Amino acid sequence: MKFVDKIEDFNFYRIFYPEKIEEIGRLRVECWKASLTENAIDERILKNSLWIDEFDANAFHWIVQYKNILAAAARMSFHLEFKNMPWYYTMSDYNLNNLKFPIASINRLVVKPEFRRNGIAKKLDNLRIEMAKELGATAIVAQPAPNRIESLKKLGFKYFGKINRTKELPGVDFSLMILEL
């Protein structure tokens, strides 16, 4: 775990898989449960109370701690082809062939409800954008939930529209947004 920044009592760390991945997986489910109705969440997620997927092993991860509490987490993946992106199947209505590789995708940003409105999500977004630039990404693809669209627009992401429904969260209208670097 590597300390990267601080906002008041919130400490930001870059972590290295599999470090804290189970805690992150539990935090994801906890935050999604707090934000969505049970009908919008796949039963497998609710039963396991742990959301870890095949992209976690090769992704970059950040966590935010408040004292000894895991307050937030975020992930960024790097891709050399579209079919290796999380939820690629949901973007089939869009022609993304003009994007050049490598590209990054930001996803799995969660903040505990009691810690929201403290600048945590914005800081995690900026940390991921900075790393994507450092690693030579030409663009960053995001598939945000409705509550994240405006904050990503403020960071320069272009809104393309809604994507097809996901298997894991079929009740949520996710969208496609891209930041060209």
Image (cartoon, rainbow, N blue to C red):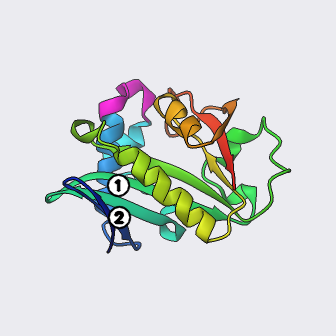
24 in relation to 175, above or below: below
> x%, y% of residue 7?
28, 54
Q: Which residue is mark 2?
A: 21
Task: Tell me the residue that label 1 is attached to.
Answer: 25
* Rendered location of residue 115, percent (x, y): 24, 41
Front residue of 19/67: it is 67
Looking at the rendering, in which quadrant would you find the C terminus?
A: bottom right
Vertical order, 55 against 168 (above or below): below
The location of residue 132, given as percent across then percent down, is 59, 63
Amino acid type of the residue tagged 2 in the rendering: Ile
Q: Residue at x 83, y 42 (%)?
A: 95
**Residue at x 78% of width, y 35% of height:** 93
Q: Main secondary structure of the magenta part?
A: helix
| Magenta region, residue range | 34-41
**149 magenta-colored:** no
| Secondary element type, mark 1 | helix
For the residues bearing labels 2 and 1, Cβ distance under 8 angstroms? yes
